[in-house]
Amino acid sequence: MRQGFNIGYFIKEGFQSVFSHGLMSFAAVCMIVACLIIMGSFSLLAMNVDDNLKQLEDSNEFLAYIDESYTDRQIEALAKQVESVDNVASVKFVTKEEAKAIFLEGREDDGLYASIPDDVFRDRLSVHVAELERFTETVDAVCSLPGVADHRAEGELAEGFVTVRNAVTAVAWVLVGILAAVSLFIIANTIRLATFARREEIAIMKMCGATDGFVRGPFIVEGLILGVMGAAAAFLIQWAVYAAVCRAFVESGAVTLFTLMEFKEIWTQVLGIFLTAGAAIGAVGSGFAIRRFLQV
């Protein structure tokens, strides 16, 4: 018998199997949709947290106020000590005059601020940290040094975002793993029904010399079709849900603390991930299902 790589034959047989097992196919698609929506929701949350982290990159800086009794030589030595602290990326000395100039930026026309004396401000070290995850640890290490009288830090918010991102990522991987396993099981059983109904035909094909690849082809295509159908449905639902969440978020006024990316900026990435994941789940599930029936 002729066994060439006939993609038309594979697609035809794959579609026939999908519609001949309507209920099981529907269940498989629903599981893929559920898996991808949960994965997509957590992924979108992680992407938005990352985006807000990028906006908070300047918050990986804190100010270490210097003891007012310190001389220039002592300040120079203190700066070197701070620079040697683990996770400190850079240190910059800021005089009280420079601090006043920074404070007055954008307030030049306000005479009340302009009259503030330099002595109100203090010499300080502007300290940049390397890893936001260790922000608090680094602040504590610097503040424990002699000569650091006080500090001001705004990076705790950024550190909180890092914690949220890590937690979201961990939960997403666990849920995706569980739902992917369930999806694989349902798809494998859907394909197994098709292979069981055609077991005699498969046995005859094998005895006539059909290769495993030729026999497996239609079933792999069936799994791919189920996966792509689930991915397309999940993408449209995810888009609608994300748009609704964005509207509710804006109306709540929470945009002052956290901003959401527009879906049109990331839809290609989301669609690509959904299609890849859906096709992979479908193909792998089909591969597991057909393997036993090829041993004739």
Image (cartoon, grey):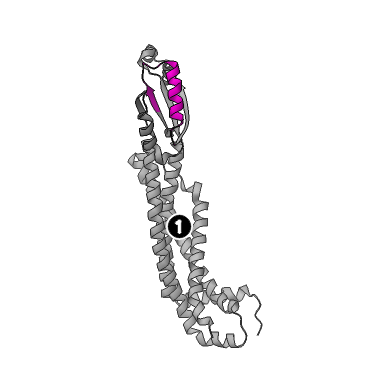
Q: Against 125, is 40 above or below?
A: below
Q: Work out whether residue 99 or residue 225 is closer to the camera in this orientation and state it.
A: 99
Instruction: Say if the magenta span includes residue 107.
Output: no
Placement of the N terminus among the 4 image quadrants:
bottom right
4 to the left or right of 112? right
Q: Quadrant of residue 126?
A: top left
Q: Work out whether residue 113 or residue 149 is closer to the camera in this orientation and state it.
A: 149
Residue 160 percent coordinates (x, y): 36, 41
Residue 148 percent coordinates (x, y): 36, 25
Q: Which element is circle 1 on? A: helix
Q: Quadrant of residue 255?
A: top left
Residue visible at 48% across and 71% down in the picture: 285
Q: Name the residue tied to disc 1.
A: 236
Residue visible at 48% across and 66% down in the picture: 281
Q: Against 52, is 78 above or below?
A: above
Q: Against 36, is 251 above or below?
A: above
Residue 94 percent coordinates (x, y): 45, 21
Range of magenta residues: 63-86
